Amino acid sequence: MKRAAYVAGIARAQRVAREAILTVAASVRPGETERAVCARIEHELALAKVQHWLHTPYAWWGERTRFDWQGTWELEALPSERKLEEGEPFILDAAPIVGGFPADFAYSGLAAAATPERASEHRELLDELVRLKRELVTWASPGALAEDVCRQVEESVALAHLDVIHTRYPANVLAHTLEGFPNFSSSAPRVGTGFQLPLLLTYAKGIVLHHLIGTPYPFLRAHAPGRARGLYAVEPHLGKNGSGAKFESVLLIDGDETRWLDPGLFGEVVG
């Protein structure tokens, strides 16, 4: 498949994920559970003919946006019966496979009737995410070492006196590749909720191929080997006090260019 066609396929998938997430985000109300809102995201994506996933939808309310829970991430992160309260932060995140191409989009919002203090705190997180998105285009220039990109993000967040949350993700990832699709696992049946076979099998294969023939390592994280190259779903996640916020957008590091497919914080995907 030609490179331009592959990038276009990822962009189309990302548009589908974004539209579903933003449609549901606009209707989130206090009193709703994480599970109920995730079911609405799944319904929106079903209307777009989505049947396969990197991961099914996640929703996190209030203090859960900081991932301060104890226990296994994969279990604790699953949508719960926790009800959203007035003025609380929330995060929605979904990674559907659309026409064989993966997407991964996340949105951070604030429920109605937030106090001025909570609104200011959330605004500070979003402002830092905007700045990170702008700076990452420079930090992740072609040829940049993966571990250096992660270090610059973490140092920048620390200078802003905010907490780094994405290092609490499985494998401590800042980003994961969207290369290598469609593949043998793209149409694997759904198994429960959370991470799905296309994600697990593709990244396991990517790690093996990296060690065997030197293909790019599938993750950007501290101590990741090699240089950043290809299409990545990048998800810096920050926290302050009881609030957390993130974006998840697609970054292309290819040839002589580094660019976002969706340059705005939660903006349109331009491909």
Image (cartoon, helix red, strand yellow):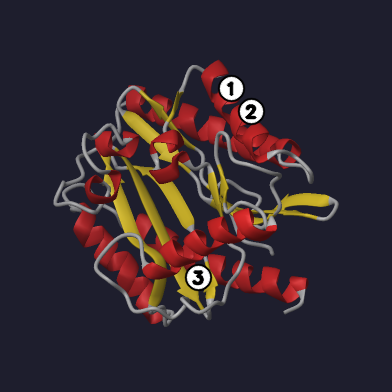
Cα separation, mark 3 vs mark 2, equals 31 Å
Cα separation, mark 1 vs mark 3, equals 33 Å
Residue 207's x, y, as percent? 55, 56
Quick check: marks 1 and 2 in contact, CB under 8 Å?
yes
Quick check: marks 3 and 2 in contact, CB under 8 Å?
no
Write down the residue under mark 3.
16
Residue drawn 32% across the image and 38% down it: 65
> Looking at numbered disc 1 in the image, what kind of residue is underneath it?
Glu
Direction right: furthest residue: 256
> Looking at numbered disc 2 in the image, what kind of residue is underneath it?
Gln
Q: Earlier in the sequence, mark 1 or mark 3?
A: 3
Q: Nearer the viewer, residue 28 or 150?
A: 150
> Looking at numbered disc 3 in the image, what kind of residue is underneath it?
Val
Q: Nearer the viewer, residue 108 or 215?
A: 215
On the question of residue 87 being in view, the answer is no
Write down the residue under mark 1.
155
- Tell me which corner region of the image, top left, top right, bottom left or bottom right, holds residue 136: top right
